[in-house]
């Protein structure tokens, strides 16, 4: 089986729409059908998707300053192994490297070009655009506090003036070679720093020590220039100037950050937290009480469900008939409309499903 057939089989497995069976009269049953989101992908399917993403975006990675296809591919494989299935499949439709990383991490993006191996979904099924895939990110502090990723004093290696030094942050088993003390980037165990792959930006606390003179120290993404960096001013004889900086991370580089100074200087660097697209959050949903509307034999009736409580948004109209001979001709916006075709009285029960995003 080639990669195209394998990948299309994975897509097809999640394209099956299940229709709801009608409940007995008076029972509680949904009247609409929908396709469930993908929830599982096998390791082989995830591997095939990663190979497709590498093939599609490796040229863009190579064009990135300090882009490293091999290191990026290894990072991508680890991220894809744990990624949500729907996000991973969505990433294959991204038109650019930047939006692919955003989709992989859960950002919703619209108007994406189909990948060479994917089947284009109908327009109605395309994910809606919810702001910027890059700017609309959330801050997450590290699970175990700050993580020392670099200390030039430990490795006896102050910065050489006007020479950028790259700093490895993600997917590293030990920061010791940089003078750091964190033992693992990924994960959230007691010994781990908990920095995930493909962060959008990192929050770093940088302390500048023993500058040889007055000058400027800058920290920036490894694919950026010194001029784009965050500045720390130092003066001769000063000690311990500390700045907390938000620095964009290079997602396609083997080493994500860089530090450069106009004078010889030592430094320490701690990661405090990171910015990424927010994690998927399940909706909190409730059904309202039901409105019961009597419908005489041969009559038509509209039954309006109770409104959603403040802070909730309606996501479904639920309609029930007490008999089989009263089909619904309309159900939307909390209103259920039906005609009683039987020779006796009947009832319509109408309610709404109301949801909100949990939080404060």
Image (tube, helix red, strand yellow):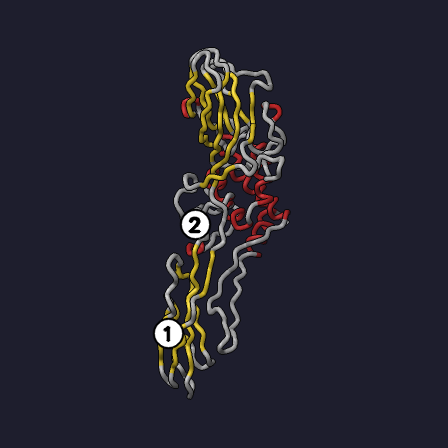
Is any atom of residue 66 visible in this view? yes
Q: Which residue is mark 1?
A: 303
Q: Nearer the viewer, mark 1 or mark 2?
A: 2
Which residue is at 59% across, 45% downward? 82
Whole-number angstrom distance, CA of label 1 to CA of label 2: 34 Å
Residue 250, horizontal then vertical, whole percent: 49, 31
Q: Quadrant of residue 293?
A: bottom left
Earlier sequence position, callout 1 versus callout 2:
1
Which residue is at 48% across, 44% downward? 103
Dot 1, how many residues are within 10 Å of its Cα: few (below 14), some (14-19), or many (20+)?
many
The number of numbered badges drawn on the structure is: 2
Residue 92, horizontal then vertical, whole percent: 51, 45
Q: Find numbered disc 2 in the image and state the secondary structure of the residue it sits on.
A: loop
Which residue is at 38% across, 84% downward? 296
Q: Nearer the viewer, residue 233 or 112?
A: 233
Which residue is at 53% across, 35% downward? 58
Q: Find numbered disc 1 in the image and state the secondary structure of the residue it sits on.
A: strand
Instruction: Name the disc covering residue 255, or none.
Output: none
* Residue sitting at the far bottom: 343
Q: Quadrant of residue 152?
A: top right
| Residue 208, placed above or below residue 55 | above
Residue 165, horizontal then vertical, whole percent: 52, 21
Residue 68, horizontal then vertical, whole percent: 55, 30
Instruction: Name the disc covering residue 360, or none.
Output: 2
Is any atom of residue 73 visible in this view? no
């Amino acid at each position: 089986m080639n990669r195209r057939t394998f990948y299309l089989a994975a897509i097809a497995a999640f394209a099956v729409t299940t229709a709801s069976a009608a409940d007995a009269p008076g029972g509680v049953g949904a009247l609409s059908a929908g396709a469930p989101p993908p929830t599982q992908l096998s390791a082989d399917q995830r591997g095939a998707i990663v190979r497709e993403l590498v093939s599609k975006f490796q040229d863009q990675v190579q064009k990135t300053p300090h882009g490293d296809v091999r290191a990026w591919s290894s990072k991508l494989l680890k991220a894809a192994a744990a990624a949500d299935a729907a996000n991973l499949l969505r990433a294959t439709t991204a038109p650019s490297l930047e939006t692919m990383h955003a989709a992989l991490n859960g950002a919703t993006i619209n108007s994406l070009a189909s990948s060479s191996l994917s089947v284009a979904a109908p327009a109605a099924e395309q994910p809606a655009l919810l702001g910027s895939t890059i700017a609309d990110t959330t801050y997450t502090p590290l699970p175990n506090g700050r993580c020392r990723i670099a200390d030039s004093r430990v490795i006896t290696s102050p910065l050489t003036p006007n020479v950028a030094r790259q700093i490895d942050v993600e997917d590293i088993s030990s920061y010791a070679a940089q003078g750091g003390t964190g033992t693992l980037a990924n994960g959230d165990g007691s010994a781990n720093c908990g920095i995930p792959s493909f962060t959008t930006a990192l929050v770093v606390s940088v302390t500048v020590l023993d500058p040889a003179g007055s000058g400027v120290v800058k920290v920036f993404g490894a694919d950026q220039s010194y001029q784009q960096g965050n500045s720390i001013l130092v003066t001769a004889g000063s000690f311990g100037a500390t700045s907390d900086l938000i620095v964009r991370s290079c997602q396609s580089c083997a080493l994500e950050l860089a530090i450069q100074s106009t004078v010889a200087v030592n430094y320490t660097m701690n990661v405090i937290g990171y910015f990424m697209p927010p994690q998927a959050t399940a909706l909190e949903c409730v059904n309202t009480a039901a409105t019961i509307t009597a419908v005489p034999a041969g009559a038509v009736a509209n039954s309006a469900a109770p409104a959603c409580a403040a802070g909730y948004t309606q996501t479904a109209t639920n309609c029930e008939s007490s008999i089989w001979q009263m089909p619904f001709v309309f159900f939307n916006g909390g209103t259920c409309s039906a005609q009683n075709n039987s020779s006796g009285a009947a009832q319509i029960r109408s309610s709404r499903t109301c949801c909100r995003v949990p939080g404060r």
